[in-house]
Amino acid sequence: MRIVIKLGTSTLAHKTGRINILRVEELCKVMSDLKNAGHEIILVSSGAIGMGVGKLSLQGRPTDIPTKQAAAAVGQCELMYIYDKLFSEYNHTVAQILITDDDIANTDRRQNFENTMRRLLELGVIPILNENDSIATNEIVIGDNDTLGAIVATTVQADLLIILSDINGLYTADPHKNPGAVLLDRVEKITPEIEQMTGGAGSALGTGGMATKLKAAKIAVAAGTDMVIANGNNPKSLYDIVEGKNVGTRFFAEKVK
Ligand code: GLU
């Protein structure tokens, strides 16, 4: 299977913005193993801004654009250093691709992006993508990596998009506010009732939230890609997700690719 895995900041970093070493080590180990088992793995990783905040010892996520962009530049380096180191331990090669909405909107650039992705996969590389936060401003920003994950999944015609975050999946209501909220394990069709179940923002260091995840699900299923939202706190659950077992919420593709 060709699998796109999106890792949110809350999965990769502690609340301080510093890397969650055990978690990231385990994730890289499981992803390497899935690749060894014959799957193609593409990573969409957040955490650049969050880790920049940690490394620069800033007081929290910056609100002004230059500091955010500077934090992303520092944190992206740190992120790729860690991925390169950990995947190398299992003999896998990684590549970094940073894009903005402009690159997707422009036909030539989108084609170049597609060609590069295809070639990287043929070469057996694990592409790691993020938004190019250091140059993206409001006008050209994709804005969140859930959407980026869906764009990447449709570009490479992935079989499965997995979004790992600090929530177990889609609930009938916000579980932080409503203790009676029930986790939905399957969504066959994204109806207006399903859309009403989202709301609320993401974590303190990342963007996202359930609304962007649902937006991503719509893009993915329309293009023939299943999508799973699951909690990133247990990296081994990736095995179960890939085997099609019930973990988190699975959105089923509307059409066969
Ligand atoms: N691109 C941002 C980063 O790497 C994260 C965006 C998101 O959290 O969705 O920090």
Image: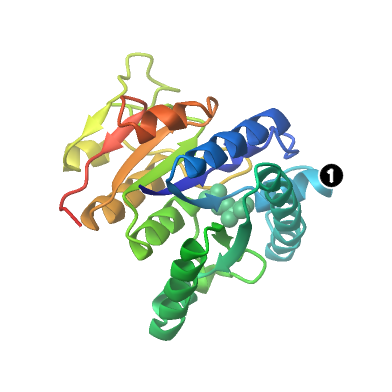
Pick the residue in front: 248 or 174: 248
**Mark 1 — residue?**
57
**Residue 211: image x %, image y %?**
37, 44
Residue type marked 1:
Ser
Q: Name the residue: 51% across, 73% down.
A: 139
Image quadrant in which you'd find residue 226 = top left
Which residue is painted at 73% across and 66% down in the image? 66
Q: Is residue 59 left or right of residue 47?
A: right
144, 123: nearer the viewer: 123
| Picture quarter with the C terminus | bottom left
Q: Secondary structure at mark 1?
A: loop
Closer to us: 232 or 2: 2
Which residue is located at x 69 percent, y 28 percent? Answer: 22
154 is higher (above) or lower (below) than 248: below
- Under 8 Å from ligand 1: the CB of mark 1? no
Q: Quadrant of residue 106?
A: bottom left
Judge whether residue 208 can be spotted in this image: yes
Provide residue 190's location: percent of width, then percent of height.
20, 43
What is the total number of numbered labels drawn onto the structure image?
1
Residue 169 image point, x, y percent: 38, 30
Compared with 132, 220 (above or below) is above
